[in-house]
Every structure is written in C-alpha cells, then in structure tokens.
Amino acid sequence: VRRLTVPAIQRRKAGGVTAEPVVMLTAYTARMAQLLDPVCDMLLVGDSLGQVIYGLDTTVRVTLDMMCAHGAAVVRGSYKSVVVIDMPFGSYEASPEAAFLSAARVMKETGAAAVKLEGGEAMAPTIAFLVARGIPVVGHVGLTPQAVNALGGYGARGKSAAEAAKIAADARAVSDAGAFAMVIEGVMEPLARDITGQVSAVTIGIGASPACDGQVLVLDDMLGMFERVPRFVRRFDDLAGRISAAAESYAAAVRERSFPADAELYGVQRADSKPA
Ligand code: KIV
Ligand code: NA
C-alpha cells in the first residue's frame, strides 16, 4: 500500500465539497500508529502529548525533542496515513526563518509529510514561507491551546460576533497562505460551518461542526483514558476502566501465586506434556 499524500487529501475538497470526510486521530507511539493507520487518513502527533504522555498541565512546555522522538516513532509505525507533526510552542513564532529551521528539523528527523502550527493572520506569512520551501502546513484556529496563558482557559471561542469575525479572518488568512488543511477547535458550530464553506483548505473539526471536511480527536480522550474531558469528546471506549481491571486481575494472581503457572515457565515439566 502506498502512503496517502498531501495532494490526495487536498483533492477530497477539489469540487468545493468533501464527499468523504477526512478521518484523523492523534498518535504518539509506534504501536498505536500501527493500530490506527489502516483506519485513518491522517495521524497527528499532537503536542497534546504533553498532557497525555508526559503529565504536563498545558502544552506550553512541550519541546522539539519530544515532538521529533514521538514523530519518528509514529512514522515508523505507519505506512498509509499522512503523518502531521505539531510544532511546539516557541519553535516557530519568532520569525518565518525560525519556523523553517524548526520545521525542517522535524521533517528530517521524523520523515513526516507535514507540520501543524497554531495561529491565524499573524502566522500567515510564516505559513507561506514554509509552503514555498516545500513543507506542507496544517493550520489551527479557534481555540489554540498553546495560547492558554493569554486566553485564560479552554472555553469555546467565537461566541461574540467580533470574535467570530476574527476567527473567520484567521481561517481565510491561513488558507490563503497555502495551508492545505486546518484544525478548527472549540468554536460555535455555525462559525465552523461557515469557514468550511469559505476556505479552500480542508477543515478538520474538533469541537467544531459535522460540516467540517474531516474530524480529529485526541486518541486517549476518545478511548476513555481520562475522567474529565471537554464536551466535544465522545468516549468510544472505557480503556481506563479496562486497564484498572486488568491490573487488579494481575495483582490478585501474583498475590495468590497463581501467576506464573507452569505453562508460563521454563524448565518445568508440564502436567499435560508427554515425557521426553
Ligand atoms: O495536540 C493535539 O492533539 C491537537 C489536536 C487536538 C488537534 O492539536
Ligand atoms: Na496541538
């Protein structure tokens, strides 16, 4: 199977409507990438790994080293999906040149197809700079978690007419700058619907709208790994409960010495085996 390409994702929206929604999930490890790859069109190595993998309380302290290590693992574990790597806070905002150096490092060290960065109009020149130099870019507008210290929290965006107009302008700027896709996160539904109709970039919603050209969720959120999740998360499983139950079964087996059993040991004559 050949890996999907960025132009192939773009062609989904060529006629103005996306007949087949783009399926995206986050992945941070090689094995998870292997499991998700046959099902997804795109895998996002999100800087959400800061919270999900490293126990940080925001994404602000995530480093380029972390993104490169997990990005390389996800690329190794996948063969079909377009892999997108988040640019962490501080690695791209200072200038288009700084962004290029960081993004080029990510591309070289991971083998991913594209990078993602947060921001609207202010980041448009940077997006154009990267795209002109051969680095496909995914934008991210609306609720942008790296700006949590400025926004004051993770509440939905675009509630006032002024804020909605600003987010729509951000989305148009990101698309016009050449981003092939953009995540729209945590906004009022009609705004995400309008943006999707206005921009040529493929819109990928999270807490946005079913009208978006695709959807993404944080893997561990949708698997039910966390107690507290935003309103926009649907839990498709209860992995946290199943992991706790498995750990309890293991602990009970160890404590009653029923694990390990003969069949799980070397050099023990099994009751059911024939004599040599
Ligand atoms: O970091 C991440 O996982 C993301 C998605 C929520 C879009 O940016
Ligand atoms: Na992110």
Image: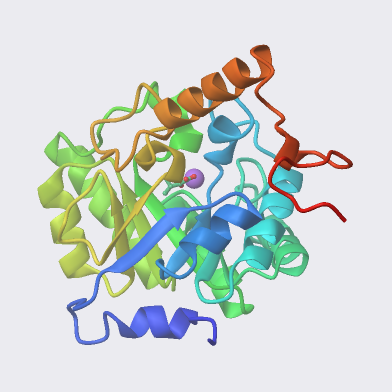
Residue at (51%, 60%) from the top-left corner?
A: 35
The mark total stands at 0
Does any portion of residue 116 appear in the rendered image?
Answer: no
Q: Residue furthest front?
A: 275
Does any portion of residue 26 appear in the rendered image?
Answer: yes
From the viewer's perspective, is residue 144 above or below residue 230? below
Residue at (47%, 60%) from the top-left corner?
A: 36
Foreground pick, 172 / 217: 217
Foreground pick, 272 / 103: 272
Which percent across, then down, holds residue 211? 15, 61
From the viewer's perspective, is residue 203 above or below residue 45? below
Quarter the C terminus occupies:
bottom right
Q: Is residue 170 left or right of residue 112?
A: left
From the viewer's perspective, is residue 155 above or below residue 24? above
Which percent across, then down, holds residue 86? 56, 52
Residue at (19%, 48%) from the top-left corner?
A: 165
Image quadrant where residue 18 sits: bottom left
Q: Residue furthest top?
A: 255
Which percent across, then down, holds residue 177? 43, 70
Residue at (69%, 70%) from the top-left corner?
A: 111
Q: Is residue 131 left or right of residue 145?
A: right
Foreground pick, 55 / 101: 55
Which percent across, then down, holds residue 184? 31, 52
Foreground pick, 64 / 56: 56
Q: How is the image coloured?
A: rainbow
